[in-house]
Image: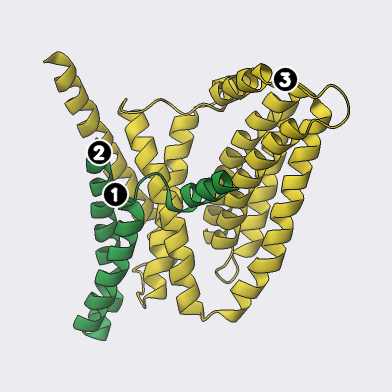
Amino acid sequence: MTFLLTMAAATAAVAIEMLEALAIVLAVGMARGPRDAVLGALAAVAAVVLLCLALGPGLLASADLHLLRVIVGSLLLLFGLEWLRKGILRMAGRRRRSSSYDEFIEEREALGERLPAESGADWAARLVAFKGVFLEGLEVGLIVLALGSAPGHLAPALLGAAVALFLVSAIGLVLHEPLRRLPETQLKLGVGVALTAFGTFFTAEGLGVEWPLGDVALLYVAGLFAVTAWVATRRLARSRQLVGAT
Amino acid sequence: MSALVRSLRHLILGETWTIPLGVGVTLVLALLLRAALPGGAWQAVGGFAVAALLVVALASSLRTRS
């Protein structure tokens, strides 16, 4: 079961990050030319892979297992709680809903306003694609390394990332209507719940806790954060309605 | 370059200091609780204490934003 949970969390988290990167690459490609967009994106992917290969195995091998779990758990909590916070605010109407499609349109319009290079390499376009893919890719790398750091978790985390890569590539091939139809806000809230549950589980284990029912704890901890998110969303939405009515 | 560093800080720590602070405070309080409680008690209920502290951290981050 832990295998499936880790894989599902990795798939969802990586797919969402990759969708955001895809939106930027598509925008650069449509506004300035696909060649420069792909070159910038490939350079960013290479940089992220090299960074993960250089730092990941060394960090995972040298640290004490308990300390590693606390570090990895805290990292997952930073990501998970932030996604959860934003998701709650979006669902409650306190913040604009998340949409890679809107980001794509905004990025394309912004790029369209800048003058393209007259000939040769369009470094501005490459840089925009590189920066977008590098930042999203770094988040993907951190999440996969964090989820895969526990013994036996690396295979499902990598498998989940591969499934996400396949899904997002498929979406990219038939864009852009599917991008608009994705319920991104709900997906991000769900990923926030999953990452927070994994973060809580690993952090507590690193501090010497033995969870009742073992790995099943991931499910009831996720349930706790899902209920918390639901209650917080309702409360924030209700207070917004009251402010609007007065 | 500074924009990239700013983006990286934003990526790791998020938009608000409440969550990194909340995670830090949770770790400190959990360590204090672990030291105060007998070993068996911490092993059994420590996870729920950590989860409860994180729920408080999340609630606090929503309060500061709203």
Indicate the chain coloured green by its letter. Answer: B
**Count of numbered circles in the view:** 3
In what quadrant of the picture does the C terminus of chain B appear? top left
Q: Closer to the N terminus: mark 3 or mark 2? A: 3
Q: Amino acid at mark 1?
A: Leu
Examine the rendering and report whether any part of residue B54 can be seen: yes
Q: Are marks 1 and 2 on the same chain?
A: no
Q: Which mark is residue A232?
A: 2
Residue at numbered disc 3 = A115
Kindly state the secondary structure of the residue where label 3 is placed: loop
Which of the 4 image quarters holds residue A103? top right
Chain of the residue displaying label 1: B
Chain of the residue displaying label 3: A
User: Looking at the image, which residue is at 35% across and 29% down?
Assistant: A91
Q: Amino acid at mark 3?
A: Leu
Q: Which mark is residue B58?
A: 1
Indicate the chain coloured yellow by its letter. Answer: A
Mark 3: give few (<14), some (14-19) or many (20+) Cα within 10 Å.
Answer: few
Task: Name above or below for residue A14 compared with residue A89.
Answer: below
Q: Percent position (x, y) of residue A115?
A: 72, 20
Q: Are marks 3 and 2 in contact (CB under 8 Å)?
A: no
Q: Percent position (x, y) of residue A49?
A: 72, 56
Measure how far apart labels 1 and 2 are at the Cα level. 10 Å
User: Looking at the image, which residue is at 36% across and 56% down?
Assistant: B20
**Apparent side of residue A184 relative to residue A161 in the rendered image (left or right):** left
Q: Are marks 3 and 2 on the same chain?
A: yes
Q: Are marks 1 and 2 in contact (CB under 8 Å)?
A: yes
Q: Amino acid at mark 2?
A: Ala
Mark 2: give few (<14), some (14-19) or many (20+) Cα within 10 Å.
Answer: many
Kindly state the secondary structure of the residue where label 1 is placed: helix
Please name whichever residue, A83 or A128, is drawn nearer the observer in this view of the structure: A128
